[in-house]
Structure formats: structure tokens, C-alpha cells
Amino acid sequence: MNLLKEKILEAGRVEAGEVLKVDSFLNHQLDIELLNEIGKEFKKRFNNKNITKILTAEVSGIAIAAITAQYFNVPVIFAKKTESKNLDNETYEGEVYSYTKDKHYKIRVSKRYISQEDHLLIIDDFLANGQALLGLKQIVDEAKANLVGAGIVIEKGFQKGRKLAEEANINVESLAIIREMQEEKIVFED
Ligand code: 5GP
């Protein structure tokens, strides 16, 4: 998706530890015009699929998922990272390992919101080492629902997320795939 790649080149910042900062349009300030185009592109890529709900993880996936959902006319469920009194006791759980924090944490969705009849599309901002994606898939599997695929805004193709997703049979569509990145240079896959 050229518009997105141009935005990454213009406003993305490569930081230590192979982290791409996109706070000015995706992770902090939100470029709604761009998000609308991202939503349309996901709709195009998953257009022939029967999708009943979109699933993401809080916090950074929510805005992208919400805008994308408008093109599919379906609800968004976001998995919660914190245990809270507001969350139902009956939940589906996924386990996520964070490389940056070197710890495992749980993500949860109330059993009320996913049923066996659901066809879910996962939407997330980044695919890096694939741990968030696998945690979300665990929730879909536990609910015995159907995972249609995963729409990713930015994939860091040099990390192992793609391989793990393929091994788990997840149909991943990424709108920008970064082949390599250094401080002053970001190279995309074609
Ligand atoms: P994973 O390694 O599980 O694929 O990525 C986990 C989460 O970490 C992603 O959903 C994303 O929110 C965040 N993340 C991973 N790599 C980057 C990065 O380079 N930049 C930013 N801004 N977030 C990232």
C-alpha cells in the first residue's frame, strides 16, 4: 500500500532494538484519513470472506480495528490486557510473550462476545515476533470459532512473526512489509 509506505518513510523513526516508532500517525496521534484508506484496503483484501467480527488487542489495535470495521459492518472486540472488575469471569484467554519486556502476560475476551458461529478477522498494528497474533489465535481457537485471517498494518519481515503465523496456518495480509531498517534507511518488500 503505497500511501502507507510513503507515510512510514516520511514520519517513521527507527529506534534501537529494531523498533519502528510511528507515534505521529498510528500509535499515539492518529491520522484518520490514512486509517480510512487502511480500512478500505483490508476490506479489499478480505472482501470475499464471510467475516462476522473483528478481533484486536488493546491498546494500539483498537483505532485501526474500529475504522476497519466500518467497511465490514461488523463489531470489534478488543482483548483486554488487564484483569479488571468490569470483565466477566468467564473469559477466553491467550498468552502473549513480550520480547521487549521479557515477560508473559494474558489477554482476555469475555465468552459472551465470541461464539462457535463466528468468523473472525484479526487486525493489529504490527507483526514482529508474532506473539500477539498467536495469543489472539489462542482465544479464537478456545472459542472454537473460525479464524479467517489477520490484517496487519506494518510487518517487520526480518523478524519471525510471518514464519510462526504460517506454521499456525494463519492467512496474513500485511499492508507494508519492511525487509530491513536502519536509522536512516527503511527498505520495503515489493
Ligand atoms: P509481536 O512481537 O508479538 O509480533 O508484536 C507485539 C506488539 O508489539 C505489536 O502488536 C505492536 O503493538 C508492538 N510492536 C512490535 N514491534 C514494534 C515496532 O517496531 N514498533 C511499534 N511501534 N510497535 C511494535
Image: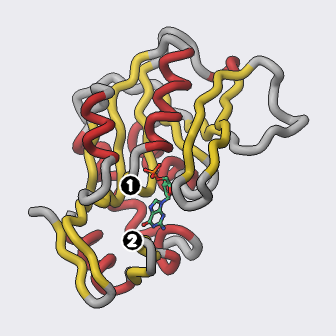
**Residue ID at (81%, 32%):** 87
Q: Is residue 5 left or right of residue 59?
A: left
| Colour logic | secondary structure
- Badge 1 marks a residue whose secondary structure is loop
Q: Residue furthest left?
A: 190
Residue 5 location, x and y as percent? 25, 72
Q: In which quarter of the image is the C terminus?
A: bottom left
Q: Residues within 10 Å of mark 1 (few under 14, many from 20)?
A: many
Q: Which amino acid is tagged 2?
A: Glu
Q: Which amino acid is tagged 1?
A: Ala
Residue 18 image label:
2
Residue 128 image label:
1
Whether the residues at callouts 2 and 1 have beta carbons within 8 Å, the answer is yes
The one of 107 and 79 positioned closer to us in this rendering:
107
Q: In this view, does 10 lie to the left or right of 16?
A: left
Vertical comparison of 187 with 53: above or below: below
- Badge 2 marks a residue whose secondary structure is loop
